[in-house]
Amino acid sequence: MPHHYRCQVEWTGAVDGPVTDAKTFSRATRITFAGRPPVEASAAPEFGGDVGRVNPEELFTASLATCQMLSYLYLAARHGVQVLAYTDDAVGELAVREGKLRMTRVTLHPVITIAAGSDAALARELVERAHEECFIANSVACEVTAEAQIIIS
């Protein structure tokens, strides 16, 4: 059964005037999801965007990192691995490949802290299983890797 997810994207930079110059028009954008606070976005600073706002490249990277984390936590809960903390310093790479500018790679760096007595080998194995089950990673063309660190507390 398919699921559908909606958002509304609005160019809020219009208040600064119409698009007349490709270098100087406002890239201010608002993304809204029904009933939740808006996300103020822009282009990446390298493309004339506002450094104080998130950009599509960051959102792309965050989507992959979040899906990996939630997939991992689900699997850990199902397999008795007690996760105490999970952080990820994910890095997305935008580069030219095959003549097109695109996201070419996202490297996830999860640091997963598990309770003493949890199976560390299983905790590490679940990183790969979560990657295989992450439907966002399964939906993109770029390389996605997870270089995990497991800490026993």
Image: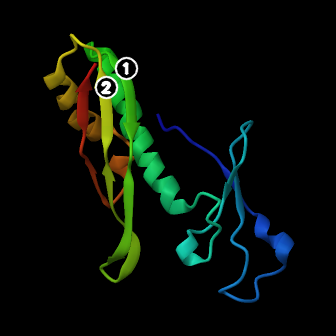
| First reached walking from the N terminus: tag 2 or tag 1 | 1
Q: Residue at x 64, y 59 (%)?
A: 53
x and y, in percent, of residue 28 in the image: 72, 66
Q: Amino acid at mark 1?
A: Leu
What is the total number of numbered labels drawn onto the structure image? 2
Relative to 51, is 119 on the left or the right? left
x and y, in percent, of residue 34 in the image: 72, 40
Residue at the disc numbered 1: 84
88 lies above or below 46: above
Q: Which mark is residue 50?
A: none
**Label 2 crowding class (10 Å Cα cut-off): few <14, some 14-19, many 20+?**
some
Q: Residue at x 68, y 43 (%)?
A: 33
**Image quadrant for the C terminus?**
top left
Instruction: Return the residue found at the far bottom.
Output: 21
Q: Residue at x 83, y 75 (%)?
A: 16
User: Is 108 in front, or is 101?
Assistant: 108
15 lies above or below 59: below
User: Is 61 in front, or is 140?
Assistant: 61
Q: Which mark is residue 113?
A: 2
x and y, in percent, of residue 101 in the image: 41, 76
Secondary structure of residue under mark 2: strand
88 lies above or below 85: below
Q: Amino acid at mark 2?
A: Thr
Relative to 72, is 125 on the left or the right? left
Alpha-carbon span between mark 2 and mark 1: 5 Å
Disc 2 and disc 1 in contact, CB within 8 angstroms: yes
Instruction: Return the residue found at the far front.
Output: 153
Q: Residue at x 71, y 37 (%)?
A: 36
